[in-house]
Image: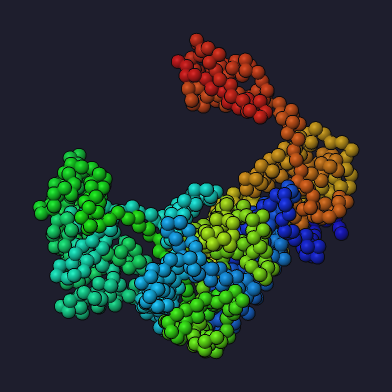
Amino acid sequence: MSDTYDFTAIETKWRQLWAERDTYRTPDPKPGDQTFFVLDMFPYPSGAGLHVGHPVGYLATDIVARYKRMAGFNVLHPMGWDSFGLPAEQHAIKTGEHPEVSTTKNIKTFRRQMDLLGLGYDWNREITTSKPDYYKWTQFIFVQMYEAWFDKQANKARPIRELPIPDDVKAAGKLAIQDYQDKHRLVYFDDALVNWCEALGTILSNEEVFDGKSEQGFDVVRVPIRQVKMRITAYTERLLAGLEGLDWPEGIKDSQRNWIGRSEGAEIRFAIDGADQSVTTFTTRADTLAGVTFLALAPEHPLVASLVPASHRAEVDAYCEAAARKSDLDRTVDAEKTGVPSGLIAINPVSGAKVQIFVADYVLPDYGTGAVMGVPAHDERDFAFAKKYGLPVFPVIDPGADTPERDAVLKGEACWTEDGIMLDPPAGTEAGLYQAGQRWRDAREAVADFLETRGLGKRVVSYNLRDWIFSRQRYWGEPIPIIHWEDGTRTSLDVSELPLTLPHVDDYKPTSYDAPALARAAGWVEVTDPKTGMKGRRELNTMPQWAGSCWYPLRFMDPKNADAPVDPSKERAWGPVDLYVGGAEHATLHLLYARFWYLALHDLGVISTAEPFSKLVNQGMLTSFAYQNTRGVILPVDEVEERGEGEFVHVPTGDRVERIGAKMSKSLRNVVTPDDVVAQYGSDAFRVCLMFMGPVEGGRVWETEKAAASLKFLRRVWNYALSGIASPADAESSAVTIATGKLVEAVTEDLENLRLNTAIAELMKFLNAVEGQPVTRDGLLTFLRVLAPFAPHMAEELWERAGQKGSVFHADWPKADADMLRAAVETIEIVVQEGGKKRGSVQLAPQADDKLVRDASIAMLKETGRDVAGLDPARIIVVRDKKTGWVRLVNIPKVG
């Protein structure tokens, strides 16, 4: 091969050799192995393929995996495909092409692009969630959870066979037993509201509904259907507690905490005037109970259907019908709150005051109790609602004399939501509720005590988290392994009956909102029990896309296992994922769901690991240039020309426009593919370019010229290495030896801390220091090993040309001679503090004695104008590194 750096020939050669030699095959762990499990959030294989922003995380994990393998770890670094999901089904509906066909084509594109980038995945462990050999075990896990219940006393899941059944339930028969079990199962059936678009013949997610219409403008209505749910709410406290031990970004942890939404408060029961029923509300502010002047019920609240009188029925029904055409988001955004009187009156349990009950769509049925108490004086939303409908405002908290708006609050003309003290309770309030002048927090506890003593309410902990609606009215998903029998019972499939594969259908649209596409496969749906002859029907819904990604790290450990999801010994050996890299947008969906599944499987003894991901890193977004006119419209890049330095013109209109960073999209025609960049500059240059742009977690803007700069750097590396290979020196200068040692030390530390951009900067710094100087064979081989994770193709080629056998990635990672490096350091910067504040620094030998350090520090202070007269040198503290003895810091007491 030529001495010219022909990146295309070199990279093609090594991709082929890596595949032929199975270079990245991961052996199963042996006793005593140091293991390291590094994982990317595996992608959904879309038809568009990868653009240059997608590999940010993939390259980061690849570099770390290569380093860890060379450092002596048994590294698991696999890749697979999250291949069930809505986009493939929508494509099938439009084109008639089976989702499996389009998905397979898309996977081939993704894998080709990943290979093009030199990503060192162990493709022997590749998994695809839509293949029966994978989703057999997704179904198996579903059955394990369906056949389990949550024991609140033990705070863990247990097999359903261990659930104690009361005698009266047993006596009532098998349907009563099933109903009782359903109230405790981790997986159960319940009614839930969905967004049905008749014109599209499909159910839409909340994110696909805009002002009661689909993206195409068709009407969408909310309808209740029987759904499969998972009792994730049983794990709220354990999900919260588990966050403390995870090395995750605090923002992601906070997102999960907020999503779970733990609130300590009280449930309060309001009697309904003239009816033998009551309304229960939840509040975190029981201290404001005496100020309640109305209640609001969700349109779906059962009392709306059962108790609203005929005089109000028409108006309420019309309002509820309109609410059914709104998504939850539309109902809760900060817009004007609306409602209609229900004709029902509630009794305030502490004051006896009669208050109207409204039906209001800003109240959601699945949050709290589906009913809220309105306290206009101390809640801005309630205040606006009360003013709109002419309801009274009763303040119960005094903002304090120093508050400018106090008079308006006390007159009921303004709302106060901050701290304060309690006013006298309203007339008619029972004595002992709370004391006037109490802080509101103390009054909150007093009111809770009052309610519990009289049986009017109780302290409770409430959560925003709702049980997970697990079923989808889709075709392209895992079939749910449940059979509904004609006698009303249901059973799950045994593992010997799995996988339950998808049947063929001619049309992928649902037949109606409660009859998904699977209903068309009559021969698959209808079953007969061979033992009893009883008729049954399979569950028609499928699992959500999240199902396969809840447990996929486990399958990577043992992807060919035909007898279990994972061999327990392998699962224990690999443990949780040591480094997980992916997008922050999955904080409250995939990451939370996976944690839930792991906790449940751990409880049931399927796995030993309670948390899936020990360390999480969110890669930053890469954007590309786009152009924006003065009206804020973003324009396609191919409609803009640069005319003069920094001046850009929209050609069709002649308008001057501004260049901005924007997410890559087809509509803006600013998508850059890895294929194009690699063809022009090479894979190694692309890798170095993308990683050098900034920290893995940081954002970056793609500029193609940066790839050219990276290629220029690699050509210098190539020439330097070839020179060393052709004419290795018998000895090298101490400067080169020290530079090599510093390189190893710095890059090792950067790799351990995922500072990949600074690691590349160290490589550049090293080349600048040694280029043109003699290098020994050992020195060159050390450099190539450090280079290898970043530019693997080039490193392999140079390693081979240097006469080395086998892959550079099977060589040991070099170690720096720390003693030599310390001995080579002549001076270091020592920070000097005076009175706890940095005053400057001094340059001294790292092993300088205390007297010299103190004298130099006093002299430095004197030069800054500080009065050091009378300063006792003995009071100056010299702080040294415990390991090396080097001076790190000088602390001087405050001087005059």
Relative horizontal placement of residue 809, taking residue 751 as reference (left or right): right
- The picture places residue 756, in percent across and down from the top left corner, at 64, 48
Q: Locate the C terminus and report the quarter of the image it occupies.
A: top left
Nearer to the camera, 472 or 323: 472
- The picture places residue 752, in percent across and down from the top left corner, at 65, 45
Nearer to the camera, 310 or 235: 235
Q: Residue furthest left?
A: 427
- The picture places residue 745, in percent across and down from the top left corner, at 71, 39
Taking the spot 47% from the left edge, 81% from the top edge, the residue there is: 484
Q: Is residue 241 above or below residue 400?
A: below
- The picture places residue 570, in percent across and down from the top left corner, at 67, 59
Relative horizontal placement of residue 279, taking residue 783 as reference (left or right): left
Q: Is residue 846 above or below residue 156?
A: above
Relative horizontal placement of residue 306, taking residue 714 as reference (left or right): left
Q: Locate the N terminus and report the quarter of the image it occupies.
A: bottom right
Taking the spot 67% from the left edge, 52% from the top edge, the residue there is: 36
Nearer to the camera, 653 or 339: 339
Q: Is residue 632 above or below residue 874?
A: below
Please indicate, yes or no, whether residue 389 appears anywhere in the rendered image: no
Taking the spot 61% from the left edge, 59% from the top edge, the residue there is: 40
Residue 359, quarter of the rendered image: bottom left
Taking the spot 84% from the left edge, 55% from the top edge, the residue there is: 806
